[in-house]
Image: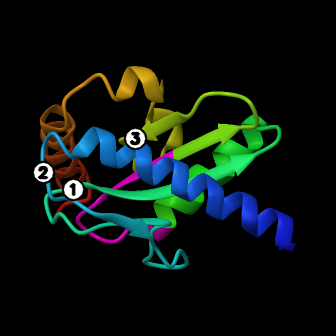
Amino acid sequence: MGLKSRTKGASGEREAIKLLLDWWKAYCPSVKFRRGNGGVNGSDIMCDDPTFPFAVECKRKARVLPSDVHRWLKQAEAQTPEGLLPMLLYREDRRPWHVYVGWTDTPEAAVHLPWSVFSNRSPEEYALIGKDFQVEVQRERGA
């Protein structure tokens, strides 16, 4: 990965942290987000609030194709630690942020919304959705 690509990725992560912070601080005023380590069992963005139900994968690209989104969803799912839900935040150049949440094994089942719509719902609502979703996933997996 070239320097320009890494710089763009880091810039995208900082933008996404600001979005997440503005949204989640209503739920947890002292919350802090930071850039993560990525990789296996790692998120691009980490949260210090243990009630934050998501492992965040963040992408920024000049032009996003459906195949990119599918690959990123698979990557996010593979890197999400047990007990968290995958979240994909991505943005094309000069376009608004989009978010995918709430899938396992089948990315097609994900909820896909522009960030402006997603962030109008309360964090409590998504936390409840996340808990219900986790229970359903555990039930399907026979846990």
Q: Name the element at disc 2.
A: loop
The amino acid type found where label 2 is placed reads: Cys
Could you tell which of marks 1 and 3 lies nearer the N-terminus?
A: 1
Q: Separation of disc 3 and disc 2 at Cα?
A: 20 Å
Q: Position of residue 111 (x, y in %)?
A: 42, 30
Q: Separation of disc 1 and disc 2 at Cα?
A: 9 Å
| Quarter occupied by residue 129 | top left
| Quarter occupied by residue 90 | top right
Marks 1 and 2 close (CB-CB < 8 Å): yes
Residue 105 seen anywhere in this rendered image of the structure: no
What residue does disc 2 label? 28
Residue plotted at (45% across, 75% down): 42
What residue does disc 1 label? 52
Residue plotted at (23% across, 69% down): 48
What residue does disc 3 label? 101
Residue 55 seen anywhere in this rendered image of the structure: yes
Q: Nearer the viewer, mark 1 or mark 3?
A: 1
